[in-house]
Amino acid sequence: MKRARQHQSTPDRRATRRRMLSPRTWLTRHAQVALDSLGRLSRNPLATLMTAAVIGIALAMPASLYLLLSNMDRLSGSWDGQASLSVFLNDTVPVAAAATLAGRIRGWPEVAAVTLVTPEQALEEFRQRSGFADVLDTLDENPLPAVLLVLPAPEHAGPRSAAALQTRLQALPETAQAQLDLQWVQRLTAMLALAQRGVLLISALLALAVLLVVGNTIRLEILGRREEIVVTRLIGATDGFIRRPFLYSGTWYGIVGALLAWLLVETGFWLLTTPVRQLANLYQSSFQLQTLPLLLLLVLLAGGILLGLLGSWIAVGRHLGAIEPG
Amino acid sequence: MIRFDNISKRYPGGFEALSNISLELEAGAMAFVTGHSGAGKSTLLKLIALIERTTRGQLHINGQNVTNISRRRIPFIRRKIGFIFQDHNLLFDRTVFDNVALPLVITGYRHQEIGRRVRAALDKLGLLSKERMYPITLSGGEQQRVGIARAVVNKPLLLLADEPTGNLDPALSFEIMELFERFNQVGVTILIASHDIGLLDRLGYPVIALDHGRLAGMEQQYA
């Protein structure tokens, strides 16, 4: 009987404890601790800013690398999936034969379309595009061969079937050279994939660095407030009560760090915008550098908060338990 | 209120600070613990405050067996006990008001209630005009009274004081003791560790005398 009552008494007591705190009071209390932590940090602005700056730089690096890659991805994306083959015919093939050949290839199941570019058309295009018109006029005869632009059927546009098509075209007696235009795009895509993996790896390492920085900062803060922790423990503070201000400190470090990272990335990209536009102009491209989308800012903030919280959690778990009165 | 059943406390390393102590302090009582330095006075108080845990024996506080109470539940026992230390243990980066409010903040009282209770406690100890001051600017006697205000603001059932007058002159010591008597008169159980034999004799309360960790005598026995 007595034992049964003891078992019951725990939830009862907990209920009385809770009764004093309505959800609103609880929220107010948390807001108070959060503001208190922020106030404590702002009383030591230089030290706080230094820690936040380390976090900011560590977060800015993967963010800017990611942006750089996504910009390059966008650049290569405009060609992606449009695998086409250029078949340069032998000089000896007359235009009429080239047209017949084009018709024959058009009949292949793996081919969607074939366009014949006659030497005259090629020369005209070259004249317009290159600015060497005067030089071309001095030539006695057209040095350009006829070209067939072969577009594979969608189901044969994959890298392997496109390569098979290339081999088949190369085997034709009329062909001087069959060139798969997709190749450099594929290489670029592969390189980008590799770089993305690298960014992921660097991000993981830098996240670890942020954890260590926050953890160490919070550890120092705990040691600095040792006396206060002992006194509050003696007065009946729970572990949660003692933990809370440190967790909020870590969170604030994360938030300020993330905002600094955002500032760094925006500034860096702003500095790059003009040279990139100039370079793009030289390539007759309207390419524009894409800066931080709002989503990435949110990711930065979430990452900063998570890392700050986790770092302080680790420090608190390791060091708070050791501080006991007596 | 406090019951020791054959309690011993052995520190890591083998030093036995308390040996086989049995005693009982009834609710509403006021008593002193005395003895030479190293006799085990502080250890006795630390056991009650659950700062140290008993090696052998059973400890009851307020009818509850706390001998093997889990670490998680210790804070809730401590909230029923007020502590007063020789060196006050005040937080010097906070005002008198904030120091005294600390136990209420920990317990989670509402803002208005905290203000009301802190001012009541400060008023009782004659510190109302000092609430905005920092402890460092107060005299030793005033600091000790802030410490007492913090200990009683939560209306504890039990007050423990470890050498509360150790750093004070006789007049101030007597004043502090009178304060304890006033709290005792409203029903708070009080246990004070002190080596000030002269003061104890003058007050005439029961004395638990310790000698090398053993109970050397309990004057004015009461069961």
Image: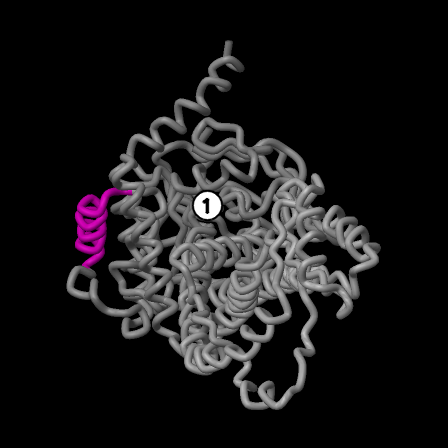
In the foreground, A230 or A115:
A115
Measured as percent of width and height from the top left, residue A58 is found at 55, 69
Taking the spot 75% from the left edge, 54% from the top edge, the residue there is: B13
Q: Would residue B59 be found to the left or right of residue A143 on screen?
A: left
Q: Would residue A280 be found to the left or right of residue B173 on screen?
A: right
Measured as percent of width and height from the top left, residue A113 is found at 61, 48
Whether residue A186 is visible, yes or no, is no
In this view, A137 is above or below B89: below
In this view, B112 is above or below A202: above
B120 inside magenta stretch: yes
Quickly name the residue at label 1: A240
In the foreground, A290 or A178:
A178
Task: Give the extent of the magenta segment.
Answer: B109-126
Whether residue B106 is visible, yes or no, is yes
B96 inside magenta stretch: no
* Magenta stretch: dominant secondary structure: helix
In the foreground, B128 or A196:
A196
Residue A111: quarter of image = top right
Measured as percent of width and height from the top left, residue A234 is found at 45, 50
Q: Residue furthest top?
A: A1
Counting labels gives 1
Measured as percent of width and height from the top left, residue B206 is found at 42, 42
- Check the residue under mark 1 and report the chain it is in: A
Specify the amino acid type for callout 1. Answer: Gly
Taking the spot 50% from the left edge, 39% from the top edge, the residue there is: B74
